[in-house]
Image (cartoon, helix red, strand yellow):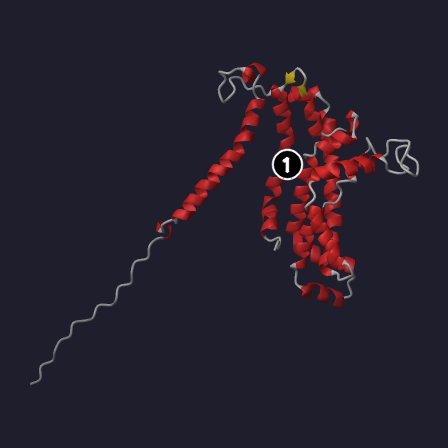
Amino acid sequence: MATTELRKPVPAPRTPARKPAGSRPVPVGRIALYATLSVVSLLMVVPFAWMVITSLKSPVEIASQDAGLLPEHWEFGNYVDALKAAPFATYARNSFVIAASHTVLNVLVASMAGYALARIRFRGSETIFYLFVAALMIPTYTKVLPEFLIVRFMPLAGGNDILGQGGSGWLDTWWALIVPGAVTPFAVFLFRQFYLDLPVELEEAARLDGLGEFRIYARIMSPQVKPAFITVALLTFESSWNNFLWPLLVTHTDSLRVIQVGLSVFKTENGTQWHFLMAGTTLATLPMVVLFLIGQRYFVQGFATAGLK
C-alpha cells in the first residue's frame, strides 16, 4: 500500500510594508536650501519692519540711545501729521497718474513692437532687435542729461520757437513727466521673447480664418502671453512710482511734484524728521506691496517662462 507524502503548504511571499508618505527622510540639501532662503527672507524683511516701527515712535524716543526695539507709546498720529505736513494727496495723485500712464503706454507699445519683431519678417528686423538689446546696456543716469536737453529745447513748446529757443519747452509740464519714460527697451525685449516661443500654427490658423495682423496680435497671440503683460505692468508701475531724480529735474511747482520728491520735505538743514519720513515712506511703499501680492503668481511665472536664452 503506497504511502502518500504530506506536503506542507508553501507560505505566500510577504509584501514589504509600505512606509507612510510622511516618513520619508527629507534630503539634507533641501533643509539647507530652506534654511538659507529663510535667513535671506528675514534679512530682506528687517528694513521694512524697522521702517514701520520707527514711524510709530516719537522724536524723543528715536533720538534716545536707550530706546528699545518696540516703541513705548505707539504714535499712530505720525501718519496724520505727515499727511498734513505736505500736500501728499496731490503728490500721490501725480505719482499714480504718471505710473498708470507709463504702464498703459509701455504695455501697449512694447507688446506691439515685440510682436512685430518676433512674428513679422521684414528687412532690418534683426538689426532693430539688436539695437534694443544694445539700449539695455546703457546706464540710466547717462541718459538723464540728453533727455533733459531734449525736453528743455522742444520746438514749439513752452514758448520755444521752431529751433527750440526762447522758452522752457516741456519743463514743468505733464509731457516731460510722461513721454520720456513711456516705452522701455526691456519691455520690448521681454515681449519679443514671449511671442517668439508661441507655435506658428496659431497664426497660420488665424490667417486661414481671414484675420488681419492686428487682430491676430490682439485676439490670438496676446492672450497666450498674459504673464508677460503682468510682469511688464508691475515692473513699469514700480519703476515709475519710485522715480525720484527725473521728476525733481523737470518740475518746480507743487502741483506737479510726485510722492518721492515730496518725502524730501522732511529732510532740512536743521535735521531729519525721521518719524514723519518713515511714516510717509511706509505710505508710499504700501501700493507696491499690494500690487505685488495681487500679481505675484504671474510675476514669478513671467520670469520663469520668459524664454530668456
Quadrant of the snapshot with the N terminus: bottom left
The residue wearing badge 1 is: 288
What residue appears at the point 55 percent right and 16 percent down from the top-left corner?
Answer: 63
Outermost left residue: 1
Work out whether 190 lies above or below 282: below
**Residue 119 place in picture, x, y as percent:** 72, 60
In depth, the one of 260 and 205 nearer the eye is 260
Name the amino acid type tagged 1: Met
What residue appears at the point 71 percent right and 26 percent down from the top-left corner?
Answer: 262
Give left or right: position of 179 versus 48: right
**Residue 138 place in picture, x, y as percent:** 70, 43
**Residue 32 place in picture, x, y as percent:** 42, 44
Work out whether 203 lies above or below 255: below
**Residue 294 place in picture, x, y as percent:** 61, 42
Work out whether 283 lies above or below 60: below
Q: How many marks?
A: 1
Give left or right: position of 86 versus 10: right
Corner quadrant of residue 258: top right
Give left or right: position of 144 versus 80: right
Quadrant of the snapshot with the C terminus: bottom right
Residue 217 in view in this figure: no
Corner quadrant of residue 223: bottom right
In depth, the one of 161 and 51 nearer the eye is 161
In depth, the one of 253 and 74 nearer the eye is 253
Mark 1: few, some, or many residues within 10 Å (few <14, many ≥20)?
some
What residue appears at the point 63 percent right and 19 percent down from the top-left corner?
Answer: 273
Residue 4 in view in this figure: yes
